[in-house]
Amino acid sequence: MMLESYQPATGEVVGKYPVFDEAAVQATVEAARQAATKWAAKGFNGRKEHLKAWKHLLVRRIDELAKLMQEETGKPLDDARLECVVAIDHLGWATKNAEKVLGPRRVPSGLIGIDFAAAVEYQPIGVVGVIGPWNYPVLTPMGSIGYALAAGNAVVFKPSEYSTGVGVWLVDTFAEVSEEPVLQVVTGYAETGAALCKANVGKISFTGSTATAKKVMAACAETLTPVLIEAGGKDAAIVAADADLDKAADAVAFGAFGNAGQTCVGIERAYVEASVYDAFVDKVSELAGRITAGVEIGPITMPSQVPVIQRHIEDALARGGRAVVGGVGSVRAPYVEPVVLVGVPEDSEAVQEETFGPTLTITKVDDLDEAVAKANGSRYGLGSAVFSRSRRTAYQVARRLRSGMTSINSVQSFAVIPSLPFGGTGDSGFGRIHGPDGLKEFTRPKAIARRRFTAPVTTLSFSRTPKDIAKTLKTLSFLHGRR
Ligand code: NAD
């Protein structure tokens, strides 16, 4: 059986790929194990050469990659280019900072351990299995692949069945800069991903839906394989009365409708203070009305998502909500035009479930406390946004939002800053890609304590005396016994 990859707008087949079964996945992971040892032995500087060469190649061939992304996902070419820009910047950051973040360093040994020198370093895990989604087929996997490679691991990548060609392209281009199979691909459907979870890799980095994340974690539990979970979201934007409304509306419209809403950190809910609510709804509606599906936004890539989007709109309307832009008629598979919903009850599907389409609910709130409470009333906790002219207010709200990341006066900006960790809480998952935390995710900390001299007090020996213990207790009183 072959996997057929197709253009979502036309259904035209654009590529055929083998479906890796359990044995093929296992063989790939074995090859990766060999490569991992050699890759780790190259050290930070040796790896840097290859990673830099890959980065340069990606910059040179960005249009080739962007066209492939457009073909398989349907997203506009400039969206694809921008995604590549951010992904390449992440690869550059991981390459440049890996040694600084992970390399050996001395740490204080403290008074109790004064006779020791203490050092910590972050060693590669070996083989990392990366299971990716299709919605950001380059940026999302690169958050794991780039960081895992820079940390010294080999990677086996299972791209989404909807963006297999992009995944294969990334791996093929890496092969141009490295003779060893340090980055490999296993193509296929859910079963191939499941086989990777069972293949005894050092860690699985999964990005996809919460429902699949639970299956991945259950499968990994069998072999105690650690997992990093980047799952779904239901991001909220909070608009304070003092916000620059034009800028807030512009950002929220982009956050909600960009990539046809198929963004894990897409804005799906907005909570707006009463005094600016009407004006904000008007401004967002105006912007939404100008977006044409097929021009500014592409089709819904995954056909099975179309009925979900439709159901959420229908549920919102049936339960008293009102569409101020679009409505059920906006769903014309494979396209969905922007839909703006107001007055939607908080317990409806459109507010509680991940819609993953170009829809937005806007809800009036009395104050920012109510906005925070409603924004936090979700089982998801990925990203969020807050709009206010007051820096103090914005930071206060940002800190109270139960999400892994918050943008102030923008949307999704945290994803393009390589030094910031990316990830969520609750049903959005755990663990982090990007930044120093993202590098450390793909390592195991190694602690080394070296005896420097024979201490005047003996403790870790049977030759110790009651006097030694008395002296140690005295040291304890000195260190921790005073208030
Ligand atoms: P999905 O869960 O359907 O599939 C994700 C990947 O898992 C695919 O490669 C798929 O083949 C594989 N898979 C499916 N079943 C599997 C199994 N039993 N074992 C192992 N692998 C299996 O998700 P999707 O539709 O590709 O992606 C959309 C979802 O991803 C949305 O929920 C979105 O919010 C989320 N997402 C999250 C982030 C993030 O960083 N948090 C980023 C992008 C997308």
Image: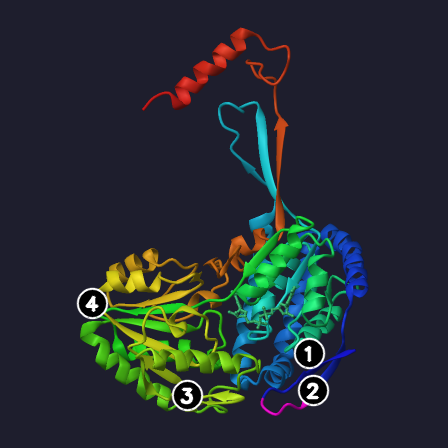
Q: Amino acid at mark 1?
A: Gly
Indicate the secondary structure of the residue bearing disc 2.
strand
Give the labeled residue for mark 1: 165
Kind of residue sitting beneath label 3: Val
Asked if the stretch drawn in magenta spans residue 11, the answer is yes
List x then y, in percent, for residue 142: 60, 66
Secondary element type, mark 4 = loop
Query: Which region of the structure is painted magenta?
Result: 9-13
Report the mark closest to the observer, 4 or 3: 3
Which numbered marker is on residue 366? 4
Mark with earlier residue (1, 2): 2
Mark found first going from the N terminus, 3 or 2: 2
**Element class at badge 1:** helix
Is the residue 443 above or below the residue 452 in the image? below
- Amino acid type of the residue tagged 4 in the rendering: Asp
Identify the residue under disc 3: 328
Residue 268, located in which quarter of the rendered image?
Answer: bottom left
**Amino acid type for the residue under numbered disc 2:** Val
Question: Does label 3 point to a residue whose CB lies under 8 Å from ligand 1?
Answer: no
Numbered disc in front, either 4 or 1: 4
Task: Determine which of the numbered discs, if any, sits on residue 14 in the image.
Answer: 2
How far apart are labels 4 and 2 at the CA level?
51 Å
Task: Tell whether 29 sits left or right of 467.
Answer: right
Splitting the image into four quadrants, where does ligand 1 fall?
bottom right
Q: Are marks 1 and 2 in contact (CB under 8 Å)?
A: yes
The count of marks equals 4
Question: Is any part of residue 155 visible from this angle?
Answer: no
Left or right of residue 136, residue 289 in this image: left
The N terminus: image quadrant: bottom right
Q: CA distance from mark 1 to mark 3?
A: 33 Å
Q: Is mark 2 within 8 Å of ligand 1?
A: no
